[in-house]
Every structure is written in structure tokens, then in C-alpha cells.
């Protein structure tokens, strides 16, 4: 019995809230502690299931102060919190209830906007007249940082007020939070750092991070920062600790010629000092989106991660962090959806949506509106609003968030086709907001669905998706994902689609008697506990949403 089946059975049987029983426990997987289902809970769940199937009796009513069967979806329990530190992990001092309060806004938000912007944006996917890639272009063309900067710096010209445009686009798209690259692997910072002159403040007298944070906060958006722990510029960064973690050959050769030794301890001090600047100078920071770790280059050895996380939390107690300070391949679809909370608050599948979600684990899929993360003039395959809405619905109804990337040009403007696609999603969200924000996945219907704290259920009716071709990953990704393996695919939504002529039948759960089509606010007739929805009889939408209530 897999975890998604167990989670669904738990809901259907109306078992007590997770906070009232030991649903999960800590086990070890590949040498790391992770969350897993408690065997006793599983045995009980199987017994309850077989009893009810045998006698045909309805599941027992849940007991206790949280009597609604969906209450645990909004306040899940995590075992053994607080958690003690070990040699590779910082302690977690908060209780499960405290963690739920801290994570609530993020779980409610569902939709965020990612922004990849840096020196690579000016190069626009081209190196000396030839295609070279996007944010990984320095690695792709294998040049040292001096050569790279001499080409890229003169092209990096963010115009005044562009962060206002970013924040307004996020609002227009219906995003609730934004994550900006404070520093990508190239090592160039968009903030004012006293640790280096390889930053926007020193080079063009602009503090892009400060402008961005202020623009977001004016519009009520939560502020997130992507920060690369990899650095192709800093001479002390030691790529030899994990050779598979990509590094420009030209940079390694330059350091060798200049007889510059690697001193990773010195780089770790630099990394921590820059993160302290970000945490303190631009507070409050709501999200730290670390990127990325592999092999031995992770945790304590790679980044002194326990100290780094403790420092971030000490300055911003409410900060939410992903898990990429530890070896986690967001591109590996076969990697289990488990999480040691000492590695971060949520996991980050990249360019795909887990087929069954990751029940009991906070997760966020990151995807791109076009094909590339950074701006690339050859990147013209822009997703339609309909495709993006499908992916957002898939994340919402599987229990996750969607972080969708836009890629500004050299002057900071977002390509118009990309911006238009984002605004198209916003138009749909304005009509269907209550089915997305503040909801959780609901698995009791044949169609994808969500539920709110009041118990209203939202059924998403979307035409069967076109799987389309495999989507290429960002260039320069990890070796095992670029040598002889298939590109990661965006998974199709496991949904019952509809045809206009035949319609689709939706069975209302017991106790639910009302059905309303969101957007039209039109009541739908209920007969024998069912509704028959025919899309052509209502206003056209890339995804129709029906609200079920008691």
C-alpha cells in the first residue's frame, strides 16, 4: 500500500486527526533520517478498511475537538518535534503546532513567481555570436570569470523602476509570493555586499534586491530570495570536493595558472557573511530558496549548513527554507518524496509534478513559462495560460505549490509573451480564487479537487491534457540527468476530463447538496446526489470549477 493510497483511505475512513495519533515516524533512507508512515497506523488503517468493506457500514464519525474529517489536512502533525541536532543537521526547536503556524501562509499561497535575473540576462543566450545557453552560459562555454564578466557586465543595464513592474506582474498573475535570484552560480550578486565588488551596487550603483523587496512589500507580496551556494567566481570555492557539481573548466585552469589555492573554509565564511547581509539588511525575508547540493558537497561539509540555517532563523524567525542545502535532485522523479525537516521546510521537484503528490510533506514544483530559466533570445516556446492553469491545478489538487519562473531581459523587462501568459493565469484566478488560495488537496472524488477550512469542496474540470513532447531541462544540469537519460517530463494531470457533448458526472459527497459554477455563480441542478456538467452550456474557461457545499 503506497503512501498516497494510505492517505486517501485515512480521509475516507474519517480517522482521528494526525495530531491525535502517531501517523509518521523518523526512519533512515540512504543514511539520512526521513519521515515515514508508522507501521501500527498502517495496520490499523488496513483493518478499518477491510471491516468497512466487509460489512458495508459507513466509516465511524471522527471524535475529538477536530471532528471534521478534513481538519488534519490543515493542521498536520509532525512526530518528534522538536528534533535534536546531529553532526550534519541543526536542531529544530519548534513544536508541530508552531511549525504549522509558521508554514500556514505558504501552504495557503499556492502560487509564486520565480525571477531569474543576472549577468547572463544581458548575454541573452549568446556567446560571441553563437548560442550558448542561459543562466549556465559561463559553464557551457567553459570560460573563466574574468572573461565572462568582460563580456556580460557591459550588457547588464536594469532600467529604473523595473522591480515595480516585476511586483505588479506577480500581483496581476495572482501570485502570493516572489523569489528573486540574489546570486546565481555565476557569483554576481544583485545586492549591496561588503564582501565583494562583484555585485550590482559596486558595478552599476543599484541595489536590485532592496528595490525588489520594497516593490513586493508595497503590494502585499511575500519576499523570497534564491541564493546559490555554488560560486563560479569566488577563488576559494573548491569544486574538487564534488567534481560532478558543474564548474567552468576555464575558471579551474585560470586558478591553476595563477597558482591560487582552493580554501573552501574561506569560501564558507564568505557564503555565511553574504547570507547574513541578506537576512539582516533586507529583513524580513520570508523564503530562502537555496540552490544546490550534490554528493559530498552538501550539509556540514559543503556549506556548514546547520550553522547557516541557525543564523538565518535567528535573524528571521519566520523564514521558510527549501531543502537544497542537502543533496537532493529536484530533477530526479524517482527520488522518494520524503523529508528530514532538519534539511529544510519543503522539497522542490523541478520541471515535473509528482504523480501522486507527496502526502504529508510540504512541496513546491518549480517550472518555467518558456523553456529557459534565464533570458535567452532563442527561447520562444512560451506556455499558454491554459497550460499553466493546468499545472497550477495539478499542484493544488495534489497538495503542493507552483513556483513559476519569468526571465527578464538585460534591462529587466519581462518578455511580453511571458508576461501575457502570466496575466492570463491571473484572469482565471480572479474568477476561481476561493478554489485555490487557502485550500488543501481533497482526494475523495474521481475528479481533482480541493477543500477549504469551512468544508467547501472545489471540483476542477479540465479537458484531458495534451502530454506533448518531453520538456528539456535547464542547460548544465547534473551529469546523471544530461548523459543518455530522457529529459524530465511534466506529468499529465490524473483527471477525468469532459467532452462538451457528453458532459461529465460529478457525485456529491454525503451531506453535500449544493453545486455552484464559480465565475458564473450559476447554481447547477443536483439529481440523485449527482450533477452533470456540460462545458458548452456555460461560459468558456480553460478549467471550470464547481463549488460543492452543504
Image: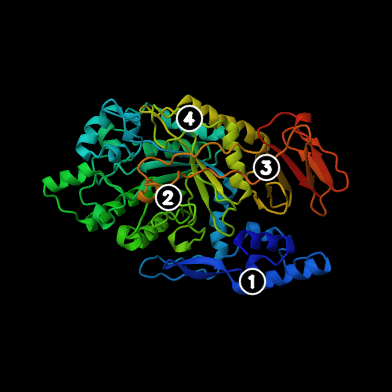
| SS class, disc 1 | helix
| SS class, disc 2 | strand
Q: Earlier in the sequence, mark 3 or mark 1?
A: 1
Which residue occupies 26% across, 27% down?
128
Q: Which residue is mark 4?
A: 381
- 292 left or right of 44 in image: left
Q: Which residue is mark 1?
A: 41
- 468 left or right of 306 in image: right
Q: Residues within 10 Å of mark 3 (few under 14, many from 20)?
A: some
Q: Which residue is mark 3?
A: 434
Residue 512 image label? none
Whether 327 is drawn above or below 502: the answer is: below
Q: Earlier in the sequence, mark 4 or mark 2?
A: 2
Q: Earlier in the sequence, mark 4 or mark 3?
A: 4
Whether 260 is drawn above or below 432: the answer is: below
- Residue 454, percent across and down? 72, 51
Residue toward you, 220 or 339: 339
The extreme bottom residue here reads 40
Residue 288 image label? 2
Whether 532 is drawn above or below 342: the answer is: above
The extreme right residue here reads 528
Circle 4 or circle 3, nearest the eye: 4
Distance between the Cα atoms at labels 2 and 3? 27 Å
Q: Earlier in the sequence, mark 2 or mark 3?
A: 2
Circle 3 or circle 1, nearest the eye: 1
Residue toward you, 473 or 103: 473
Distance between the Cα atoms at labels 4 and 3? 31 Å
Distance between the Cα atoms at labels 3 and 1? 33 Å
User: Which picture quadrant has residue 409?
Assistant: top left
- 232 left or right of 499 in image: left
Circle 4 or circle 2, nearest the eye: 4
Distance between the Cα atoms at labels 4 and 2? 29 Å
Amino acid at each position: 500500500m503506497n503512501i498516497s493510497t494510505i492517505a486517501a483511505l485515512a480521509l475516507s475512513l474519517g480517522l482521528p486527526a494526525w495530531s491525535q495519533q502517531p501517523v509518521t515516524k523518523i526512519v533512515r533512507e540512504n543514511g539520512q533520517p526521513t519521515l515515514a508512515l508508522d507501521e501500527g497506523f498502517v495496520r490499523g488503517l488496513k483493518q478499518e478498511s477491510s471491516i468497512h468493506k466487509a460489512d458495508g457500514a459507513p466509516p465511524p464519525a471522527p471524535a475529538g475537538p477536530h471532528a471534521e474529517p478534513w481538519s488534519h489536512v490543515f493542521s498536520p502533525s509532525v512526530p518528534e518535534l522538536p528534533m535534536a541536532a546531529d553532526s550534519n543537521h541543526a536542531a529544530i526547536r519548534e513544536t508541530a503546532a508552531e511549525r504549522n503556524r509558521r508554514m500556514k501562509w505558504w501552504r495557503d499561497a499556492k502560487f509564486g513567481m520565480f525571477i531569474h535575473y543576472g549577468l547572463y540576462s544581458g548575454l541573452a543566450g549568446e556567446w560571441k555570436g553563437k548560442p550558448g545557453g542561459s543562466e549556465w552560459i559561463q559553464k557551457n562555454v567553459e570560460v573563466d570569470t574574468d572573461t565572462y564578466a568582460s563580456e556580460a557586465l557591459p550588457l547588464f543595464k536594469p532600467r529604473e523602476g523595473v522591480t515595480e513592474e516585476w511586483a505588479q506582474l506577480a500581483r496581476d498573475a495572482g501570485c502570493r509570493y516572489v523569489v528573486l535570484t540574489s546570486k546565481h552560480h555565476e557569483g554576481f550578486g544583485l545586492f549591496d555586499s561588503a564582501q565583494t565588488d562583484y555585485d550590482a551596487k559596486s558595478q552599476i550603483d543599484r541595489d536590485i534586491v532592496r528595490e525588489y523587496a520594497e516593490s513586493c512589500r508595497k503590494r502585499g507580496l511575500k519576499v523570497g530570495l534564491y541564493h546559490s551556494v555554488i560560486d563560479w567566481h569566488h577563488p576559494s570555492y573548491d569544486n574538487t570536493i564534488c567534481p560532478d557539481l558543474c564548474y567552468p573548466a576555464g575558471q579551474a585552469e585560470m586558478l591553476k595558472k595563477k597558482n591560487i589555492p582552493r580554501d573552501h573554509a574561506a569560501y564558507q565564511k564568505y557564503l555565511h557573511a553574504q547570507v547574513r547581509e541578506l537576512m539582516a539588511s533586507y529583513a524580513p525575508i520570508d523564503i530562502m530558496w537555496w540552490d544546490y547540493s550534490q554528493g559530498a558537497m552538501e550539509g556540514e561539509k559543503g556549506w556548514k549548513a546547520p550553522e547557516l540555517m541557525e543564523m538565518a532563523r535567528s535573524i528571521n524567525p519566520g523564514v521558510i527554507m527549501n531543502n537544497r542545502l542537502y543533496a537532493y535532485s529536484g530533477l530526479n522523479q524517482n527520488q522518494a518524496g520524503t523529508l528530514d525537516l532538519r534539511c529544510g521546510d519543503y522539497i522542490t521537484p523541478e520541471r515535473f509534478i509528482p504523480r501522486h503528490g507527496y502526502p504529508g510533506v510540504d512541496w513546491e514544483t518549480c517550472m518555467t513559462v518558456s523553456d529557459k530559466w534565464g533570458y535567452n533570445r532563442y527561447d520562444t516556446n512560451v506556455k499558454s495560460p491554459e497550460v499553466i492553469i493546468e499545472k497550477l491545478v495539478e499542484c493544488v489538487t495534489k497538495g503542493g505549490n507552483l513556483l513559476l519562473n519569468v526571465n527578464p531581459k538585460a534591462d529587466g523587462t519581462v518578455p511580453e509573451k511571458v508576461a501575457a501568459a502570466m496575466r492570463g493565469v491571473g484572469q482565471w484566478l480572479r474568477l476561481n480564487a476561493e478554489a485555490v488560495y487557502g485550500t488543501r488537496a481533497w482526494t475523495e472524488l474521481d475528479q481533482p479537487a480541493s477543500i477549504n477550512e469551512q468544508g467547501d469542496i472545489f471540483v476542477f474540470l479540465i479537458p484531458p491534457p495534451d502530454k506533448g513532447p518531453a520538456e528539456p531541462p535547464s542547460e548544465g544540469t547534473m551529469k546523471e540527468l544530461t548523459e543518455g537519460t530522457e529529459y524530465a517530463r511534466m506529468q499529465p494531470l490524473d483527471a477525468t476530463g469532459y467532452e462538451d457533448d457528453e458532459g461529465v458526472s460529478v457525485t456529491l459527497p454525503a451531506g453535500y447538496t449544493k453545486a455552484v459554477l464559480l465565475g458564473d455563480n450559476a447554481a447547477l441542478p443536483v439529481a440523485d446526489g449527482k450533477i452533470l456538467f456540460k462545458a458548452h452550456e456555460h461560459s468558456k474557461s480553460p478549467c471550470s470549477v464547481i463549488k460543492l457545499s452543504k
